[in-house]
Image: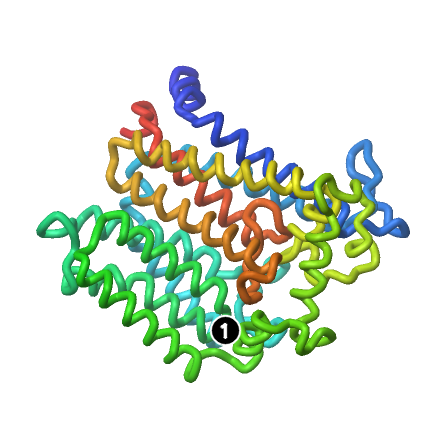
């Protein structure tokens, strides 16, 4: 047993693990400032915290760490064997959410399981990654790249959950699932004419979604992006205040716990979707670049593992996880600086929230499991 444990420890990518813990630690620091309340005191070990959210986020990080090491210890073939079963179960849970899910802020996204709320759409991202990776591994293209008819099944694998998630409605998560699926298929390769026709079909799909699927408030988020000053106290308020917070940080920031936009609560959702505003205001351009560099190193390290992986399934899983983290990060930062419409995507490993934290840790744990060569745990 001891040799197996030693083999397991040696097989872990400790550089990737370090990045996975440094980013959430920064997130806890920023979250403390974003949720700081001088009138609230919570005791944690030897410290007194003026924030209840930080205590909860510590619990989420602890749970995520456990889930990550559990996933990393799985036999290398385990995610492959049970990928379809997981996908079907999560698809069923999405249907259950539509029928009897808990409604929050006008959206039906949660399943209430006593003291715990489950968001199946978050877990569906992992389900799509594993199911699509297995299919693309099992059914490679007949030629060097995929043709149109060969893409029908893999496209349905991510389009079906996308359609269900859009009905909740949850545009941000639906787009994430689509980005994951498209990235994994493009990694394998498609014919040029298929790529062009898919792009044109996607444009048509955007028009269909605009007129048939998007709700009025979602359309308003898009139109407000181009002229937020047209409704500065309504739909444009978030974008305007966010840009003010980011710009006011200048080069070195205002200092920790000194952000006026945060302290005076001008920035909505500053602990979740707009937590980067707090970081940019207090840590400035320099601090923002350092954090973005950490995300870049995280993605580069996963891709390095993908390049070294001897297992095609593991490589595809790594690509899917990179797509998940990159899309979340890119869209979140785009929302913060007013480059993209507000679609409600958190910043991975940094924003407050249990579902996103657990999903990201679990996904990274699977990357460790399927891209590491562990003879002791692969039998």
Query: Can you name the residue that lies furthest to the top here?
Result: 3
For image coordinates 43% across by 51% down, the residue present is: 324
Front one among 289 and 319: 289
User: Where residue 370 appears, x then y in whole percent?
Assistant: 34, 36
For image coordinates 53% across by 73% down, the residue present is: 222
Q: Is residue 103 visible?
A: no
User: Where residue 3 appears, x then y in whole percent?
Assistant: 39, 15
Q: Quadrant of the C terminus?
A: top left
For image coordinates 78% across by 54% down, the residue present is: 262
User: Where residue 216 appears, x then y in whole percent?
Assistant: 54, 82
Query: Can you name the residue that lies furthest to the left here?
Result: 142
Dot 1 falls on a residue whose secondary structure is: loop
In the figure, is residue 103 to the left or right of 300? right
Front one among 370 and 148: 148
Q: Quadrant of residue 306?
A: top left
Question: Is residue 62 placed above or below 130 in the rendered structure?
Answer: above
Front one among 82 and 133: 133
Q: From the image, tell me which residue sits under label 1.
A: 169
């Amino acid at each position: 047993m001891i040799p197996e444990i030693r083999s397991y420890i040696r097989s872990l990518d400790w550089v990737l693990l370090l990045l996975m813990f440094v980013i959430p630690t920064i997130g806890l620091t920023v979250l403390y400032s974003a949720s700081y309340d001088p009138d609230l005191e919570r005791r944690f070990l030897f410290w007194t915290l003026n924030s209840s959210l930080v205590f909860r986020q510590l619990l989420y990080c602890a749970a995520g760490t456990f889930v990550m090491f559990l996933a990393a210890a799985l036999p290398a073939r385990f995610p492959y064997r049970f990928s379809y079963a997981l996908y079907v179960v999560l698809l069923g849970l999405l249907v259950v959410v539509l029928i009897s899910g808990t409604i929050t802020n006008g959206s039906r996204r949660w399943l209430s399981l006593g003291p715990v709320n489950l968001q199946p759409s978050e877990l569906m991202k992992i389900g799509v990654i594993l199911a699509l990776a297995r299919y693309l591994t099992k059914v490679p293209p007949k030629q060097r790249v995929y043709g149109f008819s060969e893409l029908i099944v893999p496209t349905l694998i991510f389009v079906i959950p996308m359609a269900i998630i859009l009905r909740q409605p949850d545009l941000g998560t639906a787009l994430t699932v689509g980005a994951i699926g498209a990235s994994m298929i493009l990694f394998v390769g498609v014919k040029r004419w298929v790529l062009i026709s898919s792009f044109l079909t996607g444009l048509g799909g955007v028009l269909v979604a605009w007129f048939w699927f998007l709700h009025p408030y979602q359309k308003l988020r898009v139109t407000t992006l181009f002229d937020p000053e047209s409704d500065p106290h309504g739909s444009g308020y978030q974008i305007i205040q966010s840009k003010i917070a980011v710009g006011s940080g200048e080069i070195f920031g205002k200092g920790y716990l000194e952000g006026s936009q945060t302290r005076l609560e001008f920035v909505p959702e500053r602990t979740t979707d707009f937590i980067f505003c707090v970081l940019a205001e207090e840590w400035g351009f320099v601090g923002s670049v350092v954090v973005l560099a950490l995300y870049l190193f995280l993605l580069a390290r996963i891709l390095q593992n993908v390049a070294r992986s001897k297992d095609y399934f593991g490589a595809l899983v790594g690509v899917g996880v990179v797509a998940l983290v990159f899309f979340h990060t890119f869209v979140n930062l785009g929302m913060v600086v007013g480059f993209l419409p507000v679609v409600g995507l958190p910043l991975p490993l940094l924003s407050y929230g249990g579902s996103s934290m657990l999903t990201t840790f679990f996904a990274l744990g699977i990357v460790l499991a399927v891209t590491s060569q562990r003879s002791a745990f692969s039998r």
